[in-house]
Image: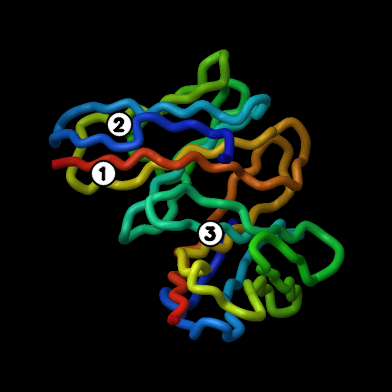
Amino acid sequence: DSGVTQTPKHLITATGQRVTLRCSPRSGDLSVYWYQQSLDQGLQFLIQYYNGEERAKGNILERFSAQQFPDLHSELNLSSLELGDSALYFCASSPGRVISTGELFFGEGSRLTVL
Amino acid sequence: AQSVAQPEDQVNVAEGNPLTVKCTYSVSGNPYLFWYVQYPNRGLQFLLKYITGDNLVKGSYGFEAEFNKSQTSFHLKKPSALVSDSALYFCAVRVPNFGNEKLTFGTGTRLTIIP
């Protein structure tokens, strides 16, 4: 168990809809990262938050947004969903306090299916 | 920009034989290198990392990896493969940076150990 919790584990929805994925990082970790894993594009970095503020942005669509709350949990909002958004969405966390040599700790993922 | 290449999508090895999963990287500066494993319907699990020091690093489940600076490679190895090693393996890289431990992942290599 990595200590990173993601909900829901599975989600099935229709095109055009909006969903919210939630992530609770490991206790004490300040940084949260969101990754998308799809069959044809591998593991793509979406966005990172550090202690409530956006720190880095990757290949995140404008239809997607995220935030990190004061209690350090994070939510990834996906709107106007398309078939191609079907993927496994991972959250990861890390301490983020210093130049860490440590690894990222990943949750089990949220599998989104858009029909 | 940092990048990682895993040249083989699929590697098949007979049980008991040695295995190698290849990874090459490109970064500006000294890299931190990681290997992760993903079992079906699970999140990514950390296997091992290279930060500095001895070029041969040992990790979980009997895996090891050799850092080769001149060839910019970080190949994953195991002396004797087990059927339970069958999984998807990801190489990842980042550079030291305060508050940002974002990893850039390779496209993954599916390892199949044949009984």
Mark 1, residues whose alpha carbon is within 10 Å: few (<14), some, or many (≥20)?
some
Residue A106 placement (x, y as % from top left): 53, 42
Residue A7 placement (x, y as % from top left): 39, 29
Amino acid residing under circle 1: Asp
Q: Earlier in the sequence, mark 1 or mark 2?
A: 2
Residue A44 in view: yes
- Quadrant of image for the N terminus of chain B: bottom right
Res B71 quadrant in image: bottom right
Name the chain under label 3. Answer: B
Above or below for A49 versus B69: above
Above or below for A101 versus A50: below
Q: Which residue is mark 2?
A: A78
Amino acid residing under circle 2: Leu
Q: CA distance from mark 2 to mark 3?
A: 27 Å
Label 2: state its secondary structure. strand
Residue found farthest to the right: B53
